[in-house]
Image: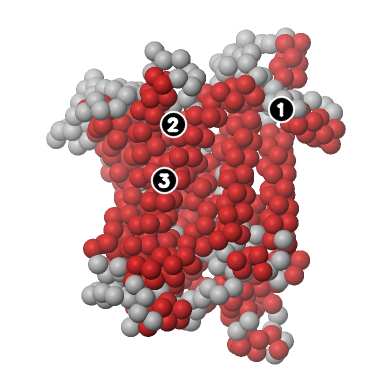
């Protein structure tokens, strides 16, 4: 999960006395981060499976007489109660989950940049209104809201689900971005640009956004995790539509996989979600450490843990 | 107390937003709930217009102007009228919820409090002893934080209840007991609640731990901590009185975000354990196109989360004197 680097209380007021880490990021340091390489490796692997996997395995819905078999050479991850191959389902479901995660990540990031950065830069009533808007969405519980909307919407597909899940995924990021924008807004180079008559949108695009990039990237990754997890929970409640890992878990649960002892049916999908989530979280941490170098795990720094 | 006024006002707006969303969503989304019910119940026989009208009235589909419907809806809410549940027909939604809410509030509430305390304590230690084995917890918790709650619940249930038989397989209490303040019932309720609560704690502790650890690291570079060290105070005292006291503030302020995750995760957890709480109602509502119940659940959960956040914000004013000076 993303670190809660809120320097603000729920109504968005600045809490004084907390240092917001600043400074231009040093992108080069990223290549030396083991966390990032591991995270990218895991996520890249699942991304690859999502793209080409479904083309390589057979029909995941194919019913056979080999019911509830454990893992074997013929069925790598065993079979379901209707004789469907679990491994095939897992590969095909990878696409569903990853697509939802990606779309939610993109949509939530776009909205949070619009709301957070524009609000933070504009200030005044615009900021008040947008802050209130995102804070209300922050305190409303996400999943029940998504369940309510999904149940009323009759169309179900990966994109429709992703669109609905995005509604609840942007507010936290918008608040984080607003806090950082407030701190960037009062910098000398921004003042200089303003005095020389640059229009607001240009200042935001060329002076502020480049400095927010690592933070935006971290928020994007966070939104992808949230999207995958929320979709899984939705599907588990019976509101799936994306053919995802959550959908698999829903069928496993409804077919009593647990009491039948078919661990090979319900363990892999959850493990896949956890692995992708951990990979994304690792990427997120390396970005956090880039933004705030103090967070790096020090080697042999026994007493104080102060960065040197 | 400007801070308190602002907070109270904000939560009033949030409650209004929840109530209004609850009213608007069904009316904004095209499609008639009656059609949805018929589609779900596979009822393909043509309905008489009268029967259809009766159903529509029950679901609140009406031709009145929107503002009139809105005020009627608000009036109903104030009287605690949520309509009749379809899945538990003809029980009123309010009654269904009043039976399941205590289960969820007690179990999820206790699990959340435990998880917060545990996470903040471990996070404090991991941040303080940076670079030691404690800090090595961080990658492990990363993995934990990404695990879907309900899947962890499935695995725990399978291993601890299914294979080892240490815990009951389902429900919130033993049916041989009668609900009430009697010893056998309470004991069986606690026994049934351990596993669901444990799965929520394990899945949610990571978020608190990581947030606290990172704030702790940032706080420890502050001048007042350095000064405290220079004065030669005991490390334990510096850690708790100087560093953790300040590092915990963002975790408290960010309570809203994490609480949302915990509540969402707990809904699915209840299903795994067939726990008689709100989560089970939600599944029934989704399966039976029970719109009145669904809306009732959304409102009740929203109000509970908003209430919890309001209390936490009041606590925040107690632990952070700056909020009091500001007003």
Lower sequence index among marks 2 and 3: 3
Left or right of A111? Residue B12 is: right
Residue B80, label in figure? 1
Q: Position of residue A144 (x, y in %)?
A: 56, 38
Give the percent coordinates (x, y) of residue A112: 58, 61
Q: State which tag comes first along the sequence, 1 or 3.
A: 1
Q: At 49% across and 72% down in the image, what residue appears?
A: A213
Which residue appears at 53% of the width and 26% of the height? Answer: B100
Disc 2 vs disc 3: Cβ atoms closer than 8 Å?
Answer: no
Q: In the rendering, which numbered label is found on residue B270? A: 2
Q: Nearer the viewer, mark 2 or mark 1?
A: 1
The span from disc 1 to disc 3 (Cα, nearest Å) is: 32 Å
Quarter of the image that includes the N terminus of chain A? bottom left
Q: Chain of mark 2?
A: B
Q: Disc 2 to disc 1, how far (Cα)? A: 25 Å
Q: Which mark is residue B114?
A: 3
Res A261 seen here: no
């Amino acid at each position: 999960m993303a670190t809660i680097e809120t320097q603000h209380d729920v109504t968005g007021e600045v809490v004084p006395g907390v240092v917001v880490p600043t400074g231009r990021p040093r992108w080069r340091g990223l290549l030396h981060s083991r966390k990032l390489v591991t995270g990218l490796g895991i996520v890249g692997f699942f991304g690859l499976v999502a793209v080409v996997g479904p083309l390589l395995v057979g029909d995941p819905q194919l019913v056979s007489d080999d019911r509830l078999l454990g893992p074997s050479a013929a069925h790598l991850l065993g079979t379901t109660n209707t004789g469907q191959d679990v491994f095939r389902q897992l590969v095909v479901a990878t696409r569903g989950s990853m697509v939802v995660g990606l779309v939610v990540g993109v949509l939530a990031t776009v909205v949070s940049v619009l709301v957070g950065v524009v609000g933070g830069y504009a200030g005044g009533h615009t900021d008040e209104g947008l802050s209130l808007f995102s804070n209300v969405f922050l305190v409303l519980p996400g999943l029940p809201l998504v369940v309510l909307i999904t149940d009323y919407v009759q169309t179900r597909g990966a994109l429709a689900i992703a669109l609905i899940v995005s509604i609840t995924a942007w507010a936290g990021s918008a608040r984080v971005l607003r806090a950082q924008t407030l701190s960037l807004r009062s910098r000398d180079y921004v003042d200089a640009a303003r005095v020389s008559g640059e229009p607001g949108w240009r200042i935001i695009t060329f002076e502020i956004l480049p400095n927010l990039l690592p933070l935006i990237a971290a928020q994007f990754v966070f939104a992808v995790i949230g999207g995958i997890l929320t979709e899984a929970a939705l599907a588990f409640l019976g509101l799936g539509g994306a053919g995802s890992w959550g959908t698999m878990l829903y069928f496993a649960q409804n077919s009593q996989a647990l009491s039948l002892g078919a661990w090979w049916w319900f363990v892999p999908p959850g493990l896949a979600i956890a692995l992708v989530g951990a990979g994304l979280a690792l990427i997120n941490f390396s970005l956090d450490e880039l933004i705030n170098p103090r967070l790096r795990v020090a080697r042999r720094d026994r007493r104080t843990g102060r960065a040197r | 107390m400007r801070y308190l006024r602002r907070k109270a006002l904000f939560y009033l707006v949030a409650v209004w937003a929840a109530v209004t969303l609850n009213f608007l969503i069904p009316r904004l989304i095209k499609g008639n709930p009656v059609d949805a019910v018929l589609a779900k119940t596979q009822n393909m026989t043509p309905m008489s217009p009268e029967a259809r009208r009766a159903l529509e009235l029950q679901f609140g589909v009406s031709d009145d102007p929107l503002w009139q419907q809105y005020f009627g809806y608000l009036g109903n809410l104030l009287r605690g009228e949520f309509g009749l549940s379809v899945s538990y027909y003809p029980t009123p939604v309010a009654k269904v919820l009043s039976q399941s809410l205590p289960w969820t509030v007690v179990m999820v509430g206790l699990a959340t409090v435990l998880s917060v305390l545990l996470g903040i304590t471990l996070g404090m230690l991991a941040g303080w002893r940076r670079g030691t084995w404690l800090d090595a917890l961080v990658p492990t918790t990363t993995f934990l934080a990404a695990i879907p709650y309900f899947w962890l619940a499935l695995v725990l249930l399978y291993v601890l209840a299914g294979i080892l038989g240490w815990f009951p397989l389902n429900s919130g209490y033993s049916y041989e007991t009668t609900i009430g303040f009697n010893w056998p019932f309470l004991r069986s309720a606690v026994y049934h609640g351990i596993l669901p609560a444990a799965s929520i704690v394990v899945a949610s502790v990571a978020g608190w731990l990581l947030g606290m650890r990172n704030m702790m690291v940032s706080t420890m570079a502050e001048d007042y901590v350095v000064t405290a060290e220079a004065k030669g105070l005991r490390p334990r005292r510096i850690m708790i009185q100087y560093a953790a006291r300040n590092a915990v503030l963002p975790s408290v302020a960010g309570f809203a975000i994490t609480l949302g995750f915990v509540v969402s995760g707990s809904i699915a957890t209840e299903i795994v354990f067939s726990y008689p709480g709100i989560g089970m109602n939600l599944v029934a509502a989704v399966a039976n196109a029970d719109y009145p119940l669904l809306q009732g659940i959304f409102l009740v959960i929203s109000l509970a989360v908003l209430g919890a956040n309001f209390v936490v914000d009041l606590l925040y004013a107690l632990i952070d004197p700056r909020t009091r000076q500001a007003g």
